[in-house]
Amino acid sequence: MPIERKLAAIMFTDIAGYTALSAKNETKALELLDTQEQILNPIIEEFNGTLHNRIGDGLLFTFPTVTDAVKCGIKIQKETKAVDDLNLRIGIHEGEITLKDGDVLGDDVNVASRIVPFSAVGGIVISGKVQQNISSLPEFETSYVGTPKLKGVAQKVEVYCITSHGLPITSDWLHFFQELMTRRVPLILGIYLAAGWAVLQFIDWMVNRYILSPHLVDFTLASLASFIPSILILAYFHGKPGKENWSKIEKIGIPVNISASILILFIFFSAKDLGAATETVLVENENGEMMERVIPKAKFRKNIVIFNMKNNVSDTDLNWIGYGLTTALNVDLCQIGRASCRERV
């Protein structure tokens, strides 16, 4: 058959929750597909539409005009509303299609399929081209959903939902979540948190290995947490593939976040010793010689109280052992260098 190219309105339908239904009851899922076609075929014919492809639970139709496609989609949603499990999402786009052996091909076909997930269950989403065509018709009311980055689509596509005729509106939260996923914000934030955790573990190892200030761990944690707003801003505006210009929010928000972070870190950590937890002092040994010794700084020493041991036997000549052992423990523990020991009489 010869290849034919023409301008058409393209409609995709999709059954929400069909995969879960198929896993639960395959027979019922297959019956639902038959029910869908029995209901949709007469409506499609009424509005001069043509069924081209069946893609799983989705159907691809074309119409000679945008108005026919939109009116057809509205009637489909009304007729299927009462059918159990037949919860449809519909996406409509206008563009040039290529007809070959009964199949419909082209980038605009891909656009129609990619905007379907932005529809509420029982609703209809349309592209900016469709919205422009019906904007002069007072019977149709629309609401802007967003301009998502559609997978496999090079062109910029604005998405709207039809809000008239009792159709449900695409949830702001749903749109917001889909926009975050499109911009890869959760992925980028997850990478940052994972990298931050690795840095935190490394700093903790360094503190213990080289006897550094334990405040370094707190300082690192506070620093990583304080810069999360900047990471979110960068991820939101630059997470999509391709080059993005710097927005006003970035130009203001990131410097403000960095300045606020530095101020907060200064307030909470300027008075804390973030260097080594030890210091070198000169001590005199038993031979009267001066020698260097590395000891913990006073602020980092751990206090240990050692109580005298009680003599539980009747021989009072052994009382000295209790005092002697306590003194010996005190001397030995102090040799560790990280403990400040005091005898308690």
Image (tube, rainbow, N blue to C red):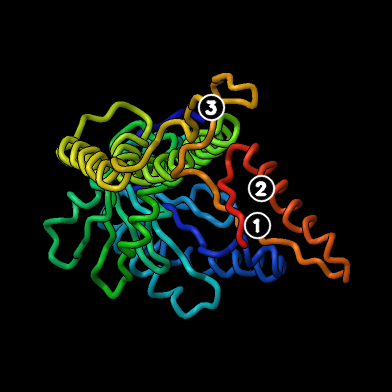
Report how many numbered discs are placed on residues in the image. Answer: 3
The circle on residue 293 is none
* Residue at position x 64%, y 27% in the image: 286
Question: Is the residue 105 above or below the residue 136 in the image?
Answer: above
- Residue 201, by quadrant, is top right
Is the C-beta separation of discs 2 and 1 under 8 Å? yes
Q: Nearer the viewer, residue 276 or 264?
A: 276
> Which residue is identified by label 3?
283
Q: Nearer the viewer, residue 286 or 113?
A: 286
Left or right relative to 244: residue 225: right
Q: Amino acid at mark 2?
A: Asn
User: Can residue 8 be seen in this snapshot?
Assistant: no
Q: Earlier in the sequence, mark 3 or mark 2?
A: 3
> Which residue is identified by label 1?
306
User: Can residue 291 be seen in this snapshot?
Assistant: yes
How crowded is the residue under tag 3: few (<14 C-alpha within 10 Å), some, or many (20+)?
A: few
For label 3, the SS is strand
Between the C-alphas of marks 3 and 2, the distance is: 18 Å
Left or right relative to 293: residue 93: left
Question: Is the residue 111 above or below the residue 98 in the image?
Answer: below
